[in-house]
Amino acid sequence: MDNGKAVIEALIFVSGSPLTVKRIAHVLEGMSEREIRETVQLLISEYEERRSGMRIVEVAGGYQLRTHQDVAEWIKKFTGLKPVSLSRAALETLAVVAYRQPIMKSEIEKVRGVNVSGTLKGLLEKNMIRIVGRKDVPGRPIIYGTTKKFLEVFNLKDLSELPTLRELKELGE
Amino acid sequence: MNYEIKLDIFQGPLDLLLYLIKKNEIDIYNIPIAIVTEQYLEYLDFMKSMNLDVAGEYLVMASTLIHIKSKMLLPVHEDEEETADPRDELARQLLEYQSYKEAALNLDTMSILGRDVFSRTASGEDEHEDDECLLEEMSVFQLVEAFKQIVSSMIAEDLMEIDTEKISLSERINEIMAKLTEEKVVTFVDLLGEITDRLRVVYTFLALLELIKLRMVKAYQVEPFGAIRIYLAVDE
């Protein structure tokens, strides 16, 4: 079925948010998940070949249609929206959570050396992190982890795609 | 009045120390504690002179530095087995912080959605937790509205009832959580619908609000006036 590619492209466009292979397979019953994956790869290279202002990216466990980084300037001019920005405090806290999750607030504070209550609240509100539960130790402290939106915003397929943290060198003798 | 800008230069005592180490081209494994402490305190004085509130964390670090400095002055007894360098803990902390600081800078260089790249919902406001249907997160006010509806739809029975059943809030919370763990999803009406006892409805609602506050559950609605579904916030 040759129009599978067209359908997939259209589905990704309509979806807006990252579309999983599973959901595509649900709609396109004739295609296997493997075929879908291959077709999307084909689409991805097509967008690249014709130097499109858009591209299909694999992010947060699905496929999403996004504008190309090179056209960001014009998009911003067009929408007039203030671009998303995160403070250094927020980025550092987010980095600690991302690499060390699930993590307690006290552990984050130990790494950063400062109180992180406000920053954590901001990240929770922005839906970048979430409460994943409580740790089974006295006081049952809340533990935090990153969200799917975090992956989406930072253009990551999954957490394993985070660049490796520079290994902590062992303290010299 | 550039106080805030000044404050924002350093992310905390560790950041300030890293700056001093870099500025003096010091080996992080062999910090000349006397020099660093002196400069660190100078900086705190500078912050005070600028009338800035020096956060408590900076003072704690100052005392740690002085403590290390005094320890370094003490003679080391030969017979003590392998006395650890008092600076080790600090060096380890600094290295750890440094690696996360780098990781944060890395994150900032990525193609950030809403800054470098845009999608049809560029603001990233859609929060479809579930792929099954498009859900909208509920506000507490919508919940209250739904609650009102249920209460008003209850047949006002003019019967006197002797309340023998004692309901506790924590009991209702446990019941709701048990139900959720079993069924994954329950609708608001499911929870309240079959109950005819007003007190029980109230308790159920309170339990639900408490669970939402604790972020144990999440409430979603597909469309305005649609059924409100309650999910476990932690899906495992």
Image (tube, coloured by chain):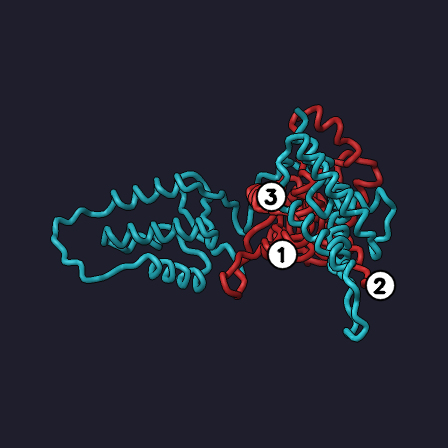
Chain colours: A red, B cyan
Could you give the CA–CA distance between mark 2 and mark 1, rounded to whole angstroms?
24 Å
Q: Nearer the viewer, mark 2 or mark 1?
A: 2
Q: Which mark is residue A132?
A: none
Q: Which mark is residue A172?
A: 2
Residue drawn at (24%, 61%) of the image? B166
- Quarter placement of the C terminus of chain A: bottom right
The residue pinned by badge 3 equals A119
Does residue A38 show up? Answer: no
Label 3 secondary element: helix
User: Between disc 1 and disc 3, whose residue precedes?
Assistant: 1
The percent position of residue A8, horizontal first and vertical second, equals 68, 46
The percent position of residue A24, horizontal first and vertical second, equals 64, 51
Q: Are marks 3 and 2 on the same chain?
A: yes
Dot 1 alpha-carbon crowd within 10 angstroms: few under 14, some 14 to 19, many 20 or more? some
The chain containing the residue under callout 3 comes to: A
Residue B153 found in image quarter? top left
Q: Nearer the viewer, mark 3 or mark 2?
A: 2
Asked if residue A131 lies left or right of residue A11, the reply is left
The percent position of residue A147, horizontal first and vertical second, equals 61, 50
Label 2 secondary element: loop
Could you give the CA–CA distance between mark 3 and mark 2, rounded to whole angstroms?
34 Å
Q: Are marks 2 and 1 on the same chain?
A: yes
The answer to whether A169 is drawn above or below residue B155 in the figure is below
Label 1 secondary element: helix
Could you give the CA–CA distance between mark 1 and mark 3, rounded to whole angstroms?
14 Å
Residue drawn at (68%, 58%) of the image? A33
The percent position of residue A29, horizontal first and vertical second, equals 62, 55
User: Between disc 3 and disc 2, whose residue precedes?
Assistant: 3
Asked if residue B164 lies left or right of residue B94, the reply is left
Residue A145 found in image quarter? bottom right
Give amino acid for label 2.
Gly
Q: Which mark is residue A107?
A: 1
